[in-house]
Image (cartoon, helix red, strand yellow):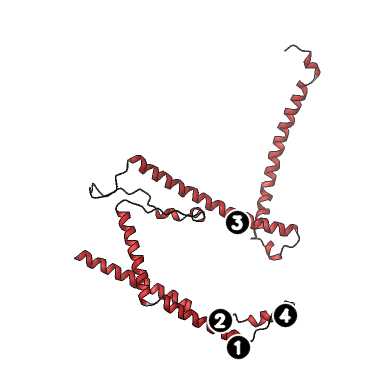
Amino acid sequence: MALDESARFGQARYYHDKKAFIHSQVRLLEAPITLPKDWRNRRARLTAEGEPYKSVPDVAVTAALSRVHADTEKSLRLSFNSQSIRQLLEQLESSQHELRKKASQGGIIIRTKSVPELLESDWIESFPQNWQHRQGNDARSSEAPLDSSRVQKYSDLRSRIVTLQAKYQTLKEKHEYYKNLQYEIRQLDAGEIQKNMLTPDSQVVKELEKMKVLLPKLIKILDTRRDAISGRRKRKSVFDDPVFDEVDL
């Protein structure tokens, strides 16, 4: 009896919390549509630039926006009335309850993910760090206990995915950084770079500062290798001399 009352209390709390959130989102959708304050100035600017357009009277614009707003309100009232919201939240609460029940019994719901989802680093967090066994030795459970090797394999795979996705995020950030840097350098080569792009904290300036430090080191390494290569070439040319062909080695 106490469990039933607790379940009903949990359902009521879930309903009221989510209902408030849905109502807040509906209010945002119900907000009237307004044009930017400078929309008339934009139209005048298009005229000055010679862009062709058809003049629309202000009365027609106001009437169109009012009609759109009225139709939106009507659609929202039909889609998000009290009954439909309750049904939606009851279905969501029931689905979450089933997922929690399944997880507590040792099962995990696995959904096939698209490639973009797999590339993101947060989806793996929905999987527990350790594979959950069935609770105790409950004979009523339909989940057979897993051997330790399979449990360890799951943990290893999960850990590997976390590591790979962290590396992916790092590479993604580097790609964006060098992509922006490439764009700025091309602008610099074309002579079209803006003055504000050459500020001390800009990417181009930072990379040039790095190169100023790395270039002497690179030259020193190349000089060292050049001397070694030159020495090997000299020794090779000596042994290639015809005189050595007459010596019985």
Residue type for callout 4: Thr
Q: Position of residue 55 (x, y in %)?
A: 68, 83
- Residue at the spot 45% in from the left edge and 46% down from the top edge: 160
Nearest to the eye among marks 3 and 1: give it.
1
For label 1, the SS is helix
Residue type for callout 3: Glu
Q: Position of residue 64 (x, y in %)?
A: 57, 83
For label 2, the SS is loop
Relative vertical location of residue 132 with respect to residue 44 in this rendering, above or below: above
Position of 40 with respect to 66 (left or right) is right
Relative vertical location of residue 220 with respect to residue 106 in this rendering, above or below: above
Q: Is residue 205 shown to the viewer in this render?
A: no
To which residue does mark 3 refer? 176
Q: CA distance from mark 3 to mark 2?
A: 35 Å
Q: Are marks 4 and 2 in contact (CB under 8 Å)?
A: no
Marks 3 and 4, the one that precedes in the sequence: 4
Mark 2: give few (<14), some (14-19) or many (20+) Cα within 10 Å: few
Q: Quadrant of residue 93?
A: bottom left
Residue type for callout 1: Val
**Looking at this view, is 119 or 114 the one in front?**
114
Marks 4 and 1, the one that precedes in the sequence: 4
Marks 4 and 2, the one that precedes in the sequence: 2
What label does residue 34 carry, if any? Answer: 2
What label does residue 59 carry, if any? Answer: 1
**Looking at this view, is 176 or 106 the one in front?**
106
Q: CA distance from mark 2 to mark 1?
A: 14 Å
Q: Quadrant of residue 26?
A: bottom left
| Residue at the extreme bottom of the image, as rendered | 59
To which residue does mark 4 refer? 47
Residue type for callout 2: Thr
- Residue at the spot 23% in from the left edge and 50% down from the top edge: 140
